[in-house]
Amino acid sequence: MEGSDGTWIEACKSGQRAAFEPLVRRYGPRAYRFALALVRDAEEAKDLSQEAFIRAYVSMHRFDSERPFYPWFLTILRNVCLSHLRRRRVKVDLEQIPELEDRRELSPDVKVRVEQALMSLSTHDREILELKAFQDLSYREISELLEIPRGTVMSRLYHARRRFKDAMT
């Protein structure tokens, strides 16, 4: 896949539908992992990330090409996932949690404990941990995505890490 995001975005804005595909290929796996961290269901995560890509494509004309694509897209994905969770309003059984392969080379028993600890956290705690630890976003990017001050990001992250640590013990 050659070309920068800007090249593909400008092509999309000029009506070239096929130009969106490289963006989906580039960001699809990260989008899926983020959705999975929030909704905790593999099929729903796949569907929601696809829905977010469709919404992003339809809204591409509103995208500011001077800004990075992924944080803008992540805002759309986050809103799609949170809307879905509000509609669903059910608890996921811990046995239904898919084992995530990207949890940093952990042993199987530790992966299970990590997943259980994550599942015991609120959606907001899981979200901020996912954004920082697994999506590798900066405090500034998280601040912009969640539309909260940088200090609030730091505070929420601190408390989410503490609750995660408590859940692991």
Image (cartoon, rainbow, N blue to C red):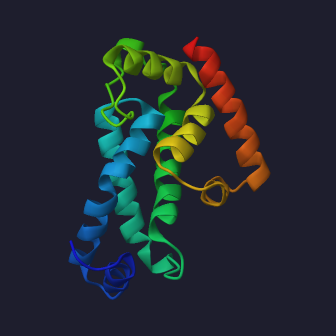
**Is 99 rendered above or below residue 139?**
above
Instruction: State which quarter of the image contains the C terminus.
Output: top right
Q: Nearer the viewer, residue 145 or 133?
A: 133
Residue at the far bottom: name it.
14
Above or below, 10 relative to 112 = below
Question: Looking at the image, which is closer to me, 101 or 36?
Answer: 101
The quadrant where residue 163 appears: top right
Tell me: residue 135, above or below residue 39.
below
Quadrant housing residue 166: top right
Most foreground residue, 110 or 79: 110
Q: Is 38 on the left-hand or right-hand side of 167?
A: left
Quadrant the N terminus occupies: bottom left
On the image, the x and y values in percent for residue 2 come to 23, 77
Q: Position of residue 50 (x, y in %)?
A: 31, 52
Q: Residue at x 37, y 79 (%)?
A: 9
Picture quadrant where residue 107 is located = top left
- Residue sitting nearer the eye, 4 or 122: 4
Q: Residue at x 66, y 31 (%)?
A: 160
Residue at 31%, 25% in the rendered image: 99
Task: Please state if 66 lies on the left or on the right of 52 as rendered.
Answer: right
Is 105 left or right of 132, judged from the image as shown?
Answer: left
**Residue 40 image offset from top left, x and y in percent:** 41, 29
